[in-house]
Image: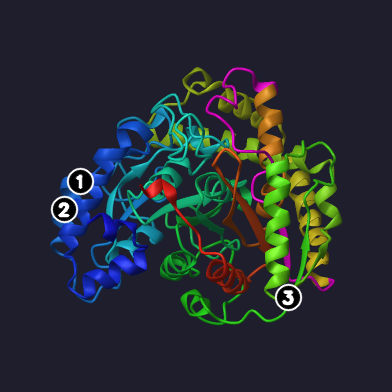
């Protein structure tokens, strides 16, 4: 069964259809892998193994992913009857009443949910070390972070506990764990995947649901299942020309690609491993026939962006804490939160509604300034997925908020602007540091062009196949 677990989700689904393995056998093997690996990694914080086994025996034969195991990030991605913790004790004892739209579609497609994965408290940082559940460890080096906020999902997929896990990205939370765990992580266009029925937008539109996988085709197939506007959604992404799975192997044509290795703000430390990752990717893209040159949107260097972005996040965090208080039936005291989140809530509550609207309007103008670069004739931006080198657990100190804030800002320097613009971006595992840790690179397309990202990513994967040593 180890060979089957090393397959991607598309391969596992085919193995079930061909009779090589039954849904129950596949689910049993994934459970055994979690039980064998998760004691060290701490990626899966809520387990539903008995229910998963019962469900595996009752999946319609025509379901495209019949019996394929999946893990859900314990932030968003709500499942009826299951706990929802968001990495925090403030939600202890609460259970979800109904499936989110995305979860319902995944289950209808035959995926079997094995459990929920660890996340930092309320998803507000780039490492997964919540007080409530303890740190998740990187399967490549247990002393290192798998990133955040989708760190539990990333560690689980990299270690072979499931071929695919759900994720979300409000400032880099899909792409950063993908970079640190050697995975494919695509943040979709804003509005591509509905947050309903219990959500409309996350972090004023910054946050988008997505997946962490080991192959481009898995990412494409999973997004096909959950993509689509639902009545009442606040955004609707531009229509795709067809299913993303059909873009795997398609010719992207000759593209104009700009790349950046030194952040134009000038305040982000430059790491040689990060520079090497982008440089190698630029050479590869050129070898694949694309026009590659150093260029980037001038707005990327705006020194005011981190403050404006952070203010919008803080305002949303304050509102989220009020919502949690209503859900559980009593207000959340700041002392119940980790120091980082307590400070975010204080900052959010100190902003007036008018100040928030002005920050959102500034972001609106920033989005148009960023888009102008793509309108000028560029197809893709190549940039680091993570602004710093792979880091150890504890690098984001929980009680020194000044140091933590600065390091977080450096980490998300290349990802958070793309959350503000709502554009799609994918992190690909194209580099390994001298110490053996993955370092990803990010490709950013114009709004609505996930199809282009999938085409290019699949060509890159074919030219330089992704390897996953952490599978064991």
Q: Are marks 1 and 2 in contact (CB under 8 Å)?
A: yes
Q: Position of residue 7 (x, y in %)?
A: 34, 62
> Which residue is depicted at the point 46% across and 28% down?
130
Would residue 163 be visible to someone looking at this image? yes
Label 2 to label 3: alpha-carbon separation? 47 Å
> For numbered disc 2, what is the local secondary structure?
helix
Quadrant housing residue 424: bottom right
Q: Is residue 147 magenta?
A: no
Question: Which residue position is annotated with label 3?
Answer: 255
> For numbered disc 1, what is the local secondary structure?
helix
Q: Are marks 2 and 3 in contact (CB under 8 Å)?
A: no
Looking at the picture, does residue 357 appear above or below residue 285?
Answer: above
Say whether disc 3 or disc 1 marks the residue closer to the N-terminus: 1
Q: Position of residue 380 (x, y in %)?
A: 72, 67
Q: Position of residue 381 (x, y in %)?
A: 73, 62
Q: In the rendering, which numbered label is found on residue 53?
A: 2
Between 256 and 69, the residue placed more toward the observer is: 256
Quadrant housing residue 395: top right
Question: Which mark is in front, 3 or 1?
Answer: 3
> For numbered disc 3, what is the local secondary structure?
loop
Q: In the rendering, which numbered label is found on residue 49?
A: 1
> Which residue is depicted at the point 35% across and 47% down?
472
Q: Is residue 231 left or right of residue 308?
A: left
What's the magenta region? 376-402
Q: Is residue 266 left or right of residue 139?
A: right
Q: Quadrant of the N terminus?
A: bottom left
| Label 2 packing within 10 angstroms: few (<14), some (14-19), many (20+) | many
């Amino acid at each position: 069964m180890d060979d089957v677990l090393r397959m991607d989700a598309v391969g596992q689904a085919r193995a079930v259809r061909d009779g090589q393995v039954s849904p129950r056998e596949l689910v049993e093997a994934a459970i055994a892998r979690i039980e064998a690996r998760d004691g060290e990694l701490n990626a899966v914080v809520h387990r539903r193994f008995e229910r998963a086994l019962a469900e595996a025996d009752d999946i319609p034969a025509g379901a495209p992913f019949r019996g394929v195991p999946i893990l859900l990030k314990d932030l968003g991605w709500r499942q009826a009857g299951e706990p929802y913790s968001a990495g925090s004790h403030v939600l202890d004892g609460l259970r979800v009443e109904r499936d989110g739209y995305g979860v319902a579609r995944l289950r209808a497609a035959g995926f079997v949910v094995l459990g929920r994965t660890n996340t930092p408290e309320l998803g507000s940082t780039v490492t997964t070390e919540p007080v409530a559940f303890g740190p998740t460890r990187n399967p490549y080096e247990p002393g290192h972070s798998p990133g955040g906020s989708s760190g539990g999902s990333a560690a689980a997929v990299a270690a072979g506990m499931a071929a695919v896990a759900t994720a979300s990205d409000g400032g880099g939370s899909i792409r950063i764990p993908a970079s640190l765990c050697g995975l494919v992580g695509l943040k979709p266009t804003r509005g591509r995947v509905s947050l309903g029925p219990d959500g409309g937008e996350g972090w004023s539109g910054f946050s988008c649901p997505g997946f962490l996988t080991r192959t481009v085709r898995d990412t494409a197939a999973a997004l096909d299942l959950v993509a689509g506007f639902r009545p009442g959604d606040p955004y609707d992404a531009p229509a795709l020309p067809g299913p993303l799975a059909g873009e795997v192997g398609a010719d992207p044509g000759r593209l104009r690609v700009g790349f950046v290795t030194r952040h134009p703000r000038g305040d982000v430390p430059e790491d040689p491993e990060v520079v090497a990752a982008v440089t190698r990717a630029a050479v590869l893209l050129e070898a694949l026939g694309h026009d590659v040159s150093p260029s980037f949107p001038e707005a990327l260097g705006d020194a005011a962006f981190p403050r404006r972005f952070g203010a919008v996040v803080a305002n949303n965090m304050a509102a989220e804490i009020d919502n949690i208080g209503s859900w559980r039936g009593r207000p959340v005291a700041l002392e119940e939160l980790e120091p980082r989140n307590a400070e975010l809530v204080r900052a959010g509550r100190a902003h007036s509604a008018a100040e928030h609207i002005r920050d959102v309007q500034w972001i609106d103008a920033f989005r148009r300034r960023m888009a102008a670069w793509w309108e000028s004739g560029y197809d893709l931006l190549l940039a680091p997925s993570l602004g710093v080198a792979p880091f150890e657990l504890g690098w984001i100190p929980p009680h020194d908020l000044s140091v933590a804030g600065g390091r977080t800002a450096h980490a998300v320097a290349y990802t958070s602007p793309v959350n503000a613009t709502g554009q799609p971006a994918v992190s690909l595992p194209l580099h390994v540091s001298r110490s053996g840790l993955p370092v990803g690179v990010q490709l950013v397309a114009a709004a609505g062009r996930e199809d282009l990202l999938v085409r290019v990513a699949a060509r890159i994967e074919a030219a330089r196949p992704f390897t996953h040593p952490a599978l064991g």
